[in-house]
Image (cartoon, rainbow, N blue to C red):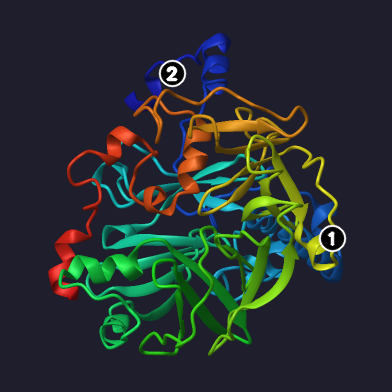
Amino acid sequence: MPPSRSRKRTSAPPATTARARRCRRPAAVPLDDVAGAVAPPFSSPLWASLSDDLVCEIAWRVLSGDILDYVRFRAVCTRWRSGTVCPRGRGVADPRFHPRRWMMLPEGHGLYPGHSRLRGYVRFFNLDTGTFVRVKLPLFNSHCALDSVDGLLLLQRDEDTGIRLVHPFTGDIAELPPLATLLAQLKNDPSVPHGSDPYWWWSLIRYCVCATVSCSAGAITVMLVFHHLRRVAFATSEDRQWAMPSWEIPVNIAPLSLQGKLYLVQFPCANGSLVFQMEVGSPPLPPKMIATCPADKLYGGYHLVECNSQILLAGYTDSSMSHILIYKLEDLILERFVPVTSIGDRALFLEDRSLSVSSKALPTIIAETVVYTCPLNRCFAQYRLTTGAWSQPFDGYSDGFNPGPYSLIQHVISCCIRNVWNKGLVYSEKETKKPGWLCWKVKRKLRIWA
Protein backbone atom coordinates (compact mmCIF):
# COMPACT_ATOMS: atom_id res chain seq x y z
CA MET A 1 0.00 0.00 0.00
CA PRO A 2 1.36 3.45 -0.85
CA PRO A 3 2.66 5.41 2.11
CA SER A 4 0.10 8.17 1.56
CA ARG A 5 -2.71 5.66 2.07
CA SER A 6 -1.12 3.81 4.94
CA ARG A 7 -1.15 6.84 7.18
CA LYS A 8 -3.68 6.81 9.97
CA ARG A 9 -6.57 9.11 9.28
CA THR A 10 -7.25 11.86 11.73
CA SER A 11 -10.29 11.12 13.84
CA ALA A 12 -13.30 13.44 13.65
CA PRO A 13 -13.52 16.12 16.32
CA PRO A 14 -15.83 15.47 19.25
CA ALA A 15 -19.46 16.38 18.76
CA THR A 16 -19.28 18.98 21.48
CA THR A 17 -16.41 20.75 19.73
CA ALA A 18 -18.22 20.78 16.37
CA ARG A 19 -21.39 22.06 17.99
CA ALA A 20 -19.44 24.81 19.73
CA ARG A 21 -17.94 25.85 16.42
CA ARG A 22 -21.34 25.93 14.77
CA CYS A 23 -22.76 28.10 17.56
CA ARG A 24 -19.91 30.55 17.50
CA ARG A 25 -21.16 34.09 16.95
CA PRO A 26 -20.34 35.36 13.47
CA ALA A 27 -18.05 38.35 13.13
CA ALA A 28 -19.66 41.70 12.45
CA VAL A 29 -19.43 42.81 8.84
CA PRO A 30 -19.28 46.55 8.12
CA LEU A 31 -22.02 47.80 5.84
CA ASP A 32 -19.83 49.11 3.07
CA ASP A 33 -22.56 49.11 0.49
CA VAL A 34 -26.07 49.29 1.88
CA ALA A 35 -27.70 48.75 -1.49
CA GLY A 36 -25.88 45.50 -2.11
CA ALA A 37 -24.99 44.09 1.29
CA VAL A 38 -28.45 43.00 2.50
CA ALA A 39 -28.80 39.25 2.12
CA PRO A 40 -32.17 37.50 1.88
CA PRO A 41 -33.23 35.48 4.94
CA PHE A 42 -34.57 32.70 2.75
CA SER A 43 -35.47 31.85 -0.80
CA SER A 44 -38.60 29.90 -1.65
CA PRO A 45 -40.05 28.75 -4.99
CA LEU A 46 -43.49 29.86 -3.78
CA TRP A 47 -42.33 33.44 -3.33
CA ALA A 48 -40.45 33.36 -6.60
CA SER A 49 -43.58 32.25 -8.47
CA LEU A 50 -45.54 35.44 -7.76
CA SER A 51 -46.64 37.30 -10.87
CA ASP A 52 -44.56 40.26 -12.03
CA ASP A 53 -47.43 42.70 -11.58
CA LEU A 54 -48.01 41.59 -7.99
CA VAL A 55 -44.29 41.75 -7.17
CA CYS A 56 -44.08 45.25 -8.62
CA GLU A 57 -47.14 46.43 -6.68
CA ILE A 58 -45.79 45.04 -3.40
CA ALA A 59 -42.38 46.59 -4.09
CA TRP A 60 -43.78 50.11 -4.53
CA ARG A 61 -45.73 49.78 -1.29
CA VAL A 62 -42.61 48.64 0.52
CA LEU A 63 -40.69 51.58 -0.95
CA SER A 64 -43.28 54.02 0.41
CA GLY A 65 -42.08 53.01 3.88
CA ASP A 66 -38.30 52.93 3.62
CA ILE A 67 -35.79 52.51 0.83
CA LEU A 68 -33.75 49.94 2.75
CA ASP A 69 -36.84 47.77 3.15
CA TYR A 70 -37.15 48.01 -0.64
CA VAL A 71 -33.52 46.91 -1.01
CA ARG A 72 -34.17 43.92 1.26
CA PHE A 73 -37.28 43.08 -0.76
CA ARG A 74 -35.30 43.00 -4.00
CA ALA A 75 -32.69 40.76 -2.37
CA VAL A 76 -35.14 37.92 -1.65
CA CYS A 77 -34.68 36.20 -5.01
CA THR A 78 -33.46 36.81 -8.53
CA ARG A 79 -36.99 37.08 -9.95
CA TRP A 80 -37.96 39.81 -7.50
CA ARG A 81 -34.74 41.65 -8.22
CA SER A 82 -35.18 41.52 -11.99
CA GLY A 83 -38.89 42.45 -11.80
CA THR A 84 -38.40 45.67 -9.81
CA VAL A 85 -36.69 48.96 -10.51
CA CYS A 86 -33.09 49.23 -9.33
CA PRO A 87 -32.56 52.34 -7.18
CA ARG A 88 -29.03 52.84 -8.47
CA GLY A 89 -28.90 55.62 -11.02
CA ARG A 90 -32.29 56.92 -9.85
CA GLY A 91 -31.56 57.68 -6.20
CA VAL A 92 -31.47 61.46 -6.67
CA ALA A 93 -33.55 62.04 -9.78
CA ASP A 94 -36.54 59.93 -8.64
CA PRO A 95 -38.14 61.27 -5.39
CA ARG A 96 -39.56 57.82 -4.63
CA PHE A 97 -36.05 56.65 -3.74
CA HIS A 98 -35.17 59.54 -1.44
CA PRO A 99 -34.30 58.31 2.09
CA ARG A 100 -36.56 60.87 3.75
CA ARG A 101 -36.51 59.57 7.30
CA TRP A 102 -32.77 59.01 7.48
CA MET A 103 -30.39 61.47 9.16
CA MET A 104 -26.62 61.59 9.33
CA LEU A 105 -25.54 60.95 12.92
CA PRO A 106 -23.21 63.51 14.52
CA GLU A 107 -20.46 61.45 16.14
CA GLY A 108 -19.32 64.12 18.59
CA HIS A 109 -15.82 64.38 20.08
CA GLY A 110 -14.67 66.25 16.97
CA LEU A 111 -15.24 63.28 14.66
CA TYR A 112 -16.74 65.02 11.65
CA PRO A 113 -17.48 63.04 8.44
CA GLY A 114 -14.18 62.58 6.65
CA HIS A 115 -12.11 62.43 9.84
CA SER A 116 -9.23 59.98 9.52
CA ARG A 117 -10.32 58.03 12.61
CA LEU A 118 -13.65 57.17 10.93
CA ARG A 119 -11.81 55.55 7.96
CA GLY A 120 -14.28 56.90 5.44
CA TYR A 121 -17.41 55.63 7.22
CA VAL A 122 -20.45 57.71 8.14
CA ARG A 123 -23.30 56.54 10.34
CA PHE A 124 -26.97 57.20 9.63
CA PHE A 125 -30.05 56.47 11.73
CA ASN A 126 -33.72 56.19 10.89
CA LEU A 127 -36.03 58.54 12.78
CA ASP A 128 -38.93 56.07 12.58
CA THR A 129 -37.34 52.65 13.12
CA GLY A 130 -34.20 53.52 15.08
CA THR A 131 -32.08 51.49 12.65
CA PHE A 132 -28.41 52.44 12.43
CA VAL A 133 -26.29 51.77 9.34
CA ARG A 134 -22.67 52.52 8.57
CA VAL A 135 -21.89 53.57 5.01
CA LYS A 136 -18.53 54.20 3.43
CA LEU A 137 -18.56 57.61 1.73
CA PRO A 138 -15.07 58.51 0.44
CA LEU A 139 -16.45 61.83 -0.80
CA PHE A 140 -16.13 63.28 2.68
CA ASN A 141 -12.34 63.24 2.35
CA SER A 142 -12.68 66.29 0.10
CA HIS A 143 -16.23 67.50 0.84
CA CYS A 144 -18.19 68.92 3.74
CA ALA A 145 -21.90 68.68 4.46
CA LEU A 146 -24.11 71.78 4.27
CA ASP A 147 -27.57 70.32 4.79
CA SER A 148 -29.71 67.21 4.62
CA VAL A 149 -32.86 67.50 2.53
CA ASP A 150 -35.29 64.57 2.18
CA GLY A 151 -32.43 62.35 3.35
CA LEU A 152 -30.11 63.50 0.55
CA LEU A 153 -26.82 65.13 1.52
CA LEU A 154 -25.95 68.56 0.18
CA LEU A 155 -22.15 68.58 -0.01
CA GLN A 156 -19.63 71.27 -0.86
CA ARG A 157 -16.38 70.30 -2.56
CA ASP A 158 -13.31 71.76 -0.84
CA GLU A 159 -11.36 72.37 -4.03
CA ASP A 160 -13.73 74.73 -5.86
CA THR A 161 -16.91 75.00 -3.67
CA GLY A 162 -18.83 72.88 -6.16
CA ILE A 163 -22.18 71.69 -4.77
CA ARG A 164 -23.15 68.03 -5.04
CA LEU A 165 -26.40 66.36 -4.08
CA VAL A 166 -25.61 62.83 -2.89
CA HIS A 167 -27.76 59.82 -2.10
CA PRO A 168 -25.91 58.17 0.81
CA PHE A 169 -27.15 54.63 0.09
CA THR A 170 -27.06 54.36 -3.71
CA GLY A 171 -24.09 56.64 -4.28
CA ASP A 172 -25.91 58.65 -6.95
CA ILE A 173 -24.67 62.24 -7.37
CA ALA A 174 -26.16 65.34 -8.97
CA GLU A 175 -23.62 68.01 -9.87
CA LEU A 176 -24.47 71.67 -9.21
CA PRO A 177 -22.53 74.92 -9.78
CA PRO A 178 -19.87 76.11 -7.33
CA LEU A 179 -21.13 78.21 -4.46
CA ALA A 180 -18.38 80.74 -5.23
CA THR A 181 -20.38 81.92 -8.25
CA LEU A 182 -22.62 83.78 -5.79
CA LEU A 183 -19.81 85.96 -4.44
CA ALA A 184 -19.68 88.29 -7.45
CA GLN A 185 -23.45 88.79 -7.29
CA LEU A 186 -23.32 89.59 -3.57
CA LYS A 187 -20.45 92.05 -3.86
CA ASN A 188 -22.32 93.98 -6.56
CA ASP A 189 -25.62 93.99 -4.68
CA PRO A 190 -26.12 97.30 -2.80
CA SER A 191 -28.71 95.73 -0.47
CA VAL A 192 -26.16 93.29 0.97
CA PRO A 193 -24.03 94.54 3.92
CA HIS A 194 -20.38 94.63 2.89
CA GLY A 195 -17.28 93.48 4.74
CA SER A 196 -13.59 93.34 3.89
CA ASP A 197 -12.81 89.96 5.44
CA PRO A 198 -13.39 86.96 3.11
CA TYR A 199 -14.74 85.09 6.11
CA TRP A 200 -17.49 87.72 6.30
CA TRP A 201 -18.70 87.00 2.78
CA TRP A 202 -18.66 83.27 3.27
CA SER A 203 -20.49 83.51 6.58
CA LEU A 204 -23.43 85.02 4.67
CA ILE A 205 -23.88 82.05 2.34
CA ARG A 206 -21.98 79.21 3.99
CA TYR A 207 -23.75 78.89 7.35
CA CYS A 208 -27.40 78.38 8.28
CA VAL A 209 -28.26 77.17 4.78
CA CYS A 210 -31.59 75.45 4.24
CA ALA A 211 -31.98 73.55 0.97
CA THR A 212 -35.03 72.39 -0.97
CA VAL A 213 -34.94 69.94 -3.89
CA SER A 214 -37.35 69.41 -6.75
CA CYS A 215 -37.04 66.56 -9.26
CA SER A 216 -39.33 66.70 -12.28
CA ALA A 217 -38.96 64.96 -15.65
CA GLY A 218 -35.34 64.15 -14.89
CA ALA A 219 -34.44 67.76 -14.10
CA ILE A 220 -33.02 68.44 -10.62
CA THR A 221 -33.47 71.92 -9.18
CA VAL A 222 -32.06 73.00 -5.83
CA MET A 223 -33.03 76.15 -3.95
CA LEU A 224 -30.90 77.47 -1.09
CA VAL A 225 -32.29 79.76 1.61
CA PHE A 226 -29.86 82.13 3.35
CA HIS A 227 -31.13 83.28 6.74
CA HIS A 228 -28.72 86.18 7.14
CA LEU A 229 -29.42 87.61 3.69
CA ARG A 230 -33.18 86.95 3.53
CA ARG A 231 -32.54 85.78 -0.01
CA VAL A 232 -32.65 82.56 -2.00
CA ALA A 233 -30.50 81.15 -4.78
CA PHE A 234 -31.38 78.42 -7.24
CA ALA A 235 -29.67 76.27 -9.84
CA THR A 236 -30.30 73.14 -11.87
CA SER A 237 -27.95 70.28 -12.58
CA GLU A 238 -27.42 71.78 -16.05
CA ASP A 239 -26.49 75.31 -14.89
CA ARG A 240 -22.99 76.68 -14.50
CA GLN A 241 -23.74 79.25 -11.82
CA TRP A 242 -26.25 80.00 -9.10
CA ALA A 243 -28.88 82.68 -9.67
CA MET A 244 -30.22 84.93 -6.93
CA PRO A 245 -33.60 86.67 -7.46
CA SER A 246 -33.89 90.30 -6.38
CA TRP A 247 -36.85 89.79 -4.05
CA GLU A 248 -36.46 89.02 -0.35
CA ILE A 249 -38.08 86.46 1.91
CA PRO A 250 -39.60 87.23 5.32
CA VAL A 251 -37.31 87.06 8.34
CA ASN A 252 -37.57 83.55 9.79
CA ILE A 253 -35.69 81.31 12.17
CA ALA A 254 -36.81 77.76 11.37
CA PRO A 255 -37.82 77.03 7.77
CA LEU A 256 -39.17 73.60 6.84
CA SER A 257 -38.14 71.87 3.61
CA LEU A 258 -40.49 69.12 2.49
CA GLN A 259 -40.75 67.39 -0.89
CA GLY A 260 -39.89 70.31 -3.13
CA LYS A 261 -41.60 72.99 -1.06
CA LEU A 262 -40.35 75.38 1.59
CA TYR A 263 -42.45 76.59 4.50
CA LEU A 264 -41.51 79.40 6.86
CA VAL A 265 -43.08 81.60 9.54
CA GLN A 266 -42.36 85.32 9.62
CA PHE A 267 -40.36 86.52 12.63
CA PRO A 268 -41.31 88.29 14.84
CA CYS A 269 -45.01 87.48 14.86
CA ALA A 270 -46.58 90.20 17.01
CA ASN A 271 -49.67 90.16 14.78
CA GLY A 272 -49.88 86.39 14.73
CA SER A 273 -48.02 83.58 12.97
CA LEU A 274 -47.90 84.22 9.22
CA VAL A 275 -47.05 81.03 7.32
CA PHE A 276 -45.51 81.33 3.84
CA GLN A 277 -44.90 78.71 1.19
CA MET A 278 -42.42 78.60 -1.68
CA GLU A 279 -42.12 76.06 -4.47
CA VAL A 280 -38.83 75.23 -6.11
CA GLY A 281 -38.66 76.41 -9.69
CA SER A 282 -36.31 77.85 -12.26
CA PRO A 283 -36.83 80.61 -11.38
CA PRO A 284 -38.81 80.22 -8.14
CA LEU A 285 -41.73 82.50 -7.37
CA PRO A 286 -41.75 84.82 -4.32
CA PRO A 287 -43.16 83.34 -1.10
CA LYS A 288 -46.94 83.21 -0.80
CA MET A 289 -48.79 83.49 2.51
CA ILE A 290 -51.01 80.45 2.94
CA ALA A 291 -52.17 80.64 6.58
CA THR A 292 -52.44 82.93 9.58
CA CYS A 293 -52.77 82.04 13.25
CA PRO A 294 -53.86 85.03 15.40
CA ALA A 295 -51.70 86.04 18.36
CA ASP A 296 -54.51 85.30 20.80
CA LYS A 297 -54.54 81.69 19.54
CA LEU A 298 -50.79 81.06 19.47
CA TYR A 299 -47.86 83.00 20.89
CA GLY A 300 -44.39 82.73 19.35
CA GLY A 301 -45.38 80.12 16.78
CA TYR A 302 -42.18 80.00 14.72
CA HIS A 303 -41.49 76.29 14.36
CA LEU A 304 -42.90 74.07 11.63
CA VAL A 305 -42.32 70.33 11.79
CA GLU A 306 -43.50 67.36 9.73
CA CYS A 307 -45.11 64.65 11.85
CA ASN A 308 -47.02 61.63 10.56
CA SER A 309 -47.41 63.22 7.10
CA GLN A 310 -48.84 66.38 8.68
CA ILE A 311 -47.19 69.79 9.01
CA LEU A 312 -47.52 71.13 12.55
CA LEU A 313 -47.01 74.67 13.85
CA ALA A 314 -45.69 74.84 17.42
CA GLY A 315 -45.69 77.79 19.81
CA TYR A 316 -46.96 78.80 23.25
CA THR A 317 -50.34 79.48 24.80
CA ASP A 318 -49.34 82.98 25.99
CA SER A 319 -46.41 85.30 26.68
CA SER A 320 -45.40 83.37 29.82
CA MET A 321 -44.17 80.61 27.46
CA SER A 322 -44.87 77.99 30.11
CA HIS A 323 -47.13 75.78 27.98
CA ILE A 324 -46.61 74.62 24.41
CA LEU A 325 -49.46 74.65 21.90
CA ILE A 326 -49.60 72.90 18.52
CA TYR A 327 -51.85 73.33 15.47
CA LYS A 328 -52.09 71.49 12.16
CA LEU A 329 -51.21 73.65 9.18
CA GLU A 330 -54.09 72.23 7.14
CA ASP A 331 -56.50 73.42 9.87
CA LEU A 332 -54.97 76.90 9.90
CA ILE A 333 -55.38 77.15 6.13
CA LEU A 334 -59.10 76.48 6.63
CA GLU A 335 -59.14 78.93 9.60
CA ARG A 336 -59.94 76.16 12.04
CA PHE A 337 -58.11 76.72 15.33
CA VAL A 338 -58.27 73.31 16.96
CA PRO A 339 -55.18 72.50 19.08
CA VAL A 340 -53.47 69.15 18.63
CA THR A 341 -53.87 67.15 21.83
CA SER A 342 -51.85 64.06 20.88
CA ILE A 343 -48.95 63.23 18.57
CA GLY A 344 -49.04 59.49 19.29
CA ASP A 345 -45.68 57.81 19.80
CA ARG A 346 -43.82 60.85 18.48
CA ALA A 347 -41.52 63.37 20.11
CA LEU A 348 -40.92 66.74 18.45
CA PHE A 349 -37.50 68.40 18.46
CA LEU A 350 -37.67 72.14 17.77
CA GLU A 351 -34.69 74.16 16.57
CA ASP A 352 -33.56 75.76 13.31
CA ARG A 353 -34.24 72.29 11.83
CA SER A 354 -37.23 70.60 13.48
CA LEU A 355 -37.67 66.82 13.54
CA SER A 356 -40.22 64.27 14.70
CA VAL A 357 -38.85 61.04 16.15
CA SER A 358 -40.58 57.78 17.05
CA SER A 359 -40.33 56.78 20.70
CA LYS A 360 -40.97 53.12 19.84
CA ALA A 361 -37.75 52.83 17.90
CA LEU A 362 -35.60 55.03 20.14
CA PRO A 363 -36.19 53.98 23.76
CA THR A 364 -34.60 57.07 25.34
CA ILE A 365 -37.18 59.27 23.59
CA ILE A 366 -40.46 59.82 25.46
CA ALA A 367 -43.71 59.85 23.48
CA GLU A 368 -46.06 62.85 23.52
CA THR A 369 -43.22 65.28 24.28
CA VAL A 370 -41.67 68.38 22.75
CA VAL A 371 -37.92 68.87 23.20
CA TYR A 372 -37.12 72.57 23.28
CA THR A 373 -35.44 75.23 25.43
CA CYS A 374 -37.30 75.60 28.71
CA PRO A 375 -38.29 79.28 29.26
CA LEU A 376 -37.37 79.12 32.95
CA ASN A 377 -33.66 78.32 32.54
CA ARG A 378 -33.07 78.38 28.76
CA CYS A 379 -31.86 74.76 28.85
CA PHE A 380 -33.08 71.96 26.62
CA ALA A 381 -35.82 70.01 28.34
CA GLN A 382 -38.84 67.85 27.49
CA TYR A 383 -42.36 69.25 27.65
CA ARG A 384 -45.07 66.64 28.16
CA LEU A 385 -48.21 67.38 26.17
CA THR A 386 -50.28 65.10 28.43
CA THR A 387 -49.40 66.86 31.70
CA GLY A 388 -48.24 70.31 30.57
CA ALA A 389 -45.06 69.99 32.65
CA TRP A 390 -41.39 70.52 31.81
CA SER A 391 -38.76 67.96 32.72
CA GLN A 392 -35.47 68.72 34.43
CA PRO A 393 -32.77 70.18 32.15
CA PHE A 394 -30.53 67.65 30.47
CA ASP A 395 -27.47 69.13 32.19
CA GLY A 396 -26.33 72.12 34.20
CA TYR A 397 -25.15 74.30 31.33
CA SER A 398 -27.25 77.28 30.37
CA ASP A 399 -26.39 77.28 26.65
CA GLY A 400 -25.50 73.73 25.76
CA PHE A 401 -24.47 70.32 26.94
CA ASN A 402 -21.88 68.73 29.10
CA PRO A 403 -19.12 67.51 26.74
CA GLY A 404 -19.90 63.88 27.56
CA PRO A 405 -20.94 61.19 27.82
CA TYR A 406 -23.79 61.80 25.41
CA SER A 407 -27.25 60.29 25.29
CA LEU A 408 -29.10 59.61 22.06
CA ILE A 409 -31.44 62.52 22.69
CA GLN A 410 -28.45 64.88 22.62
CA HIS A 411 -27.37 63.48 19.27
CA VAL A 412 -30.86 64.14 17.87
CA ILE A 413 -30.79 67.72 19.15
CA SER A 414 -27.43 68.17 17.41
CA CYS A 415 -29.08 67.05 14.17
CA CYS A 416 -31.49 69.97 14.60
CA ILE A 417 -28.68 72.55 14.78
CA ARG A 418 -27.09 72.77 11.34
CA ASN A 419 -23.92 74.55 12.45
CA VAL A 420 -23.21 71.76 14.94
CA TRP A 421 -24.56 68.71 13.08
CA ASN A 422 -21.99 68.89 10.27
CA LYS A 423 -18.89 69.61 12.37
CA GLY A 424 -18.50 66.47 14.42
CA LEU A 425 -19.90 68.07 17.56
CA VAL A 426 -22.65 67.24 19.97
CA TYR A 427 -23.80 70.65 21.07
CA SER A 428 -21.82 71.81 24.10
CA GLU A 429 -21.05 75.24 25.48
CA LYS A 430 -17.58 74.03 26.43
CA GLU A 431 -16.85 72.70 22.96
CA THR A 432 -18.01 75.87 21.21
CA LYS A 433 -15.50 77.84 23.31
CA LYS A 434 -12.56 75.71 22.22
CA PRO A 435 -10.13 77.55 19.92
CA GLY A 436 -10.72 76.79 16.27
CA TRP A 437 -13.95 74.80 16.69
CA LEU A 438 -15.33 76.49 13.57
CA CYS A 439 -12.24 75.87 11.46
CA TRP A 440 -13.36 72.42 10.30
CA LYS A 441 -11.70 72.51 6.88
CA VAL A 442 -13.20 75.94 6.17
CA LYS A 443 -10.97 78.81 7.19
CA ARG A 444 -7.95 77.38 5.40
CA LYS A 445 -9.90 77.54 2.14
CA LEU A 446 -11.19 81.11 2.40
CA ARG A 447 -8.21 82.80 0.79
CA ILE A 448 -8.50 80.41 -2.17
CA TRP A 449 -12.24 80.96 -2.66
CA ALA A 450 -12.24 84.75 -2.18
> Foreground residue, 64 or 11?
64
Secondary structure beneath disc 1?
A: loop
CA distance separating discs 1 and 2: 47 Å
Indicate the quadrant where residue 226 lies: bottom left
Left or right relative to 397: residue 321: right
* Residue 208 to residue 300: above or below: below
Q: Residues within 10 Å of mark 1 (few under 14, many from 20)?
A: few
Res 198 visible: yes
* Residue 421 to residue 213: above or below: above
Observer-side mark, 1 or 2, equals 1
Q: Quadrant of the N terminus?
A: top left
Amino acid bearing label 2: Arg
Q: Position of residue 363 (x, y in %)?
A: 64, 28
Q: Which label's residue is closer to the chain start, 1 or 2?
A: 2
Res 42 visible: no
Q: Position of residue 120 (x, y in %)?
A: 33, 51
Amino acid bearing label 1: Ser
Q: Residue at x 55, y 69 (%)?
A: 88
Q: Residue at x 52, y 24 (%)?
A: 25
Q: Residues within 10 Å of mark 2 (few under 14, many from 20)?
A: few
Indicate the quadrant where residue 137 lies: bottom left
Q: Which residue is mark 1?
A: 49
Q: Which residue is mark 2?
A: 9
